[in-house]
Amino acid sequence: MKLATLQDLYVAELKDLYNAENQLLKALPKMAKAASDPDLAQSFLDHLEETKVQIERLETIFKELELSPKGKTCKAMKGLIEEGSEVMSENADPSVMDAALITAAQRVEHYEMAGYGCVRTFAHILGFDDAADLLQQTLDEEGAANKKLTELAESTINSEAI
């Protein structure tokens, strides 16, 4: 795909996010299973449900653009998930594993927040205000998920891993 215009970049980044979210759909249940802290496990399962809605939002945007959301592999998410999988294969104390899972999950959240922030801005510039609103909803959810992970880490999980 040639990136000749901002709209080309917008579509390419949306496709990247679509693939990233679909990769995450497969990873979140594994992360929930690997977590020993019930609140952490539940936060992964809650975010799984949010991710399904986020994918639907992206599909709505692609429908409006009359384009397919498929056709791109998000290599960054693939790498982040591979790193998370490596962590889950370690023989770690359960509390240390929970801290490691939060680390891996926050890397994912920060990647997603960066991506959604960019495409939301592109949507505004391109006059796709409805899409920008949908993307802002997802950006807000990603920020809330990151905040929840920070709260879990700082309130109990990190200190239990000492």
Image (spheres, rainbow, N blue to C red):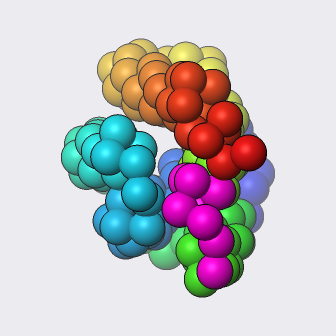
4 vs 23, left or right, is right
> Who's the residue at 53% across and 62% down the image?
94
Quadrant in which the N terminus is drawn: bottom right
Nearer-the-camera pick, 1 or 28: 28
Residue 48 seen from this side: yes
- Quick check: is 97 in the magenta stretch? yes
Give the image quarter of residue 113: top right
> Who's the residue at 61% across and 41% down the image?
160
> Who's the residue at 23% across and 46% down the image?
49
> Who's the residue at 41% across and 27% down the image?
141
What is the span of residues highlighted in magenta in the rendered image?
Answer: 91-98
109 vs 3, left or right, is left
Q: Position of residue 106 (x, y in %)?
A: 63, 43
- Quick check: is 34 in the magenta stretch? no
Quadrant in which the C terminus is drawn: top right
Q: Position of residue 144 (x, y in %)?
A: 46, 23
Q: Position of residue 30 (x, y in %)?
A: 39, 71
113 vs 67, left or right, is right
Nearer-the-camera pick, 97 or 74: 97
* Above or below, comparing residue 136 to residue 63 in the picture: above
* Above or below, comparing residue 96 to residue 29 in the picture: above
Give the image quarter of residue 3: bottom right
* Above or below, comparing residue 72 to residue 14 in the picture: below
The number of numbered discs placed on residues in the rendered structure image is 0
* Above or below, comparing residue 99 to residue 27 in the picture: above
